[in-house]
Image: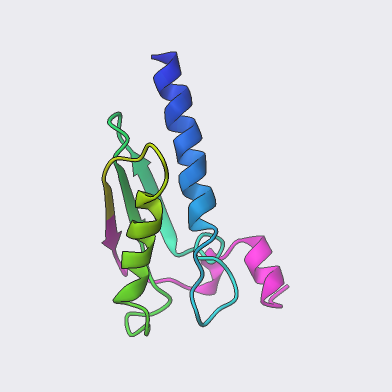
Amino acid sequence: MVQANITKNILGDAVIETLKTIFDPEIPVNIYELGLIYEVKMDDELNVTILMTLTSPNCPVAESLPVEVKERISEVDGIKEVTVELTFEPPWDKDMMSEEALLELGFI
């Protein structure tokens, strides 16, 4: 059981690191620091569910960004299935960005 938890933690970290390599093409900040990832869940079978949003419902990458997230997380060695759920509740705003993202974009 301890080994399973260690594996799950390592894979969870790998998922987060992968999310940090995916960028909204209009904003030079990764989607994780931008606050577009609301939740990352991994079950005991190493299936991942990601709840994410977009900067707006009319975002030009509304079709492609969730697909890219699914594809990139599926490439993490050890992950079984990936489900990406898109939500607009709560609506995204700049207060969801990390301090790093705010700094990068000149908000602080």
The stretch of residues the image draws in magenta is 84-108
Q: Residue at x 35, y 43 (%)?
A: 41
- Using the rendered view, name the quadrant where residue 85 is placed: bottom left
Q: Which residue is drawn at 33% across and 66% down?
A: 66
- Using the rendered view, name the quadrant where residue 72 is placed: bottom left
Q: Is residue 33 above or below residue 24?
A: above
Residue 17: x and y in percent read 54, 50
In the displayed structure, does residue 85 sit left or right of residue 103? Answer: left
In the displayed structure, does residue 101 sit left or right of residue 93? Answer: right
Residue 93: x and y in percent read 48, 73
Which quadrant is the N terminus positioned in?
Answer: top left
Q: Residue at x 50, y 49 (%)?
A: 16
Residue 48: x and y in percent read 32, 44
Of residue 16 and residue 98, the one placed in the foreground of this image is 16
- Check if residue 104 falls in the magenta segment: yes
Which quadrant is the C terminus positioned in?
Answer: bottom right
Q: Which residue is drawn at 55% across and 66% down?
A: 30
The extreme top residue here reads 1
Q: Is residue 74 above or below residue 23?
A: above
- Check if residue 92 falls in the magenta segment: yes
- For residue 46, say whether it is visible: yes
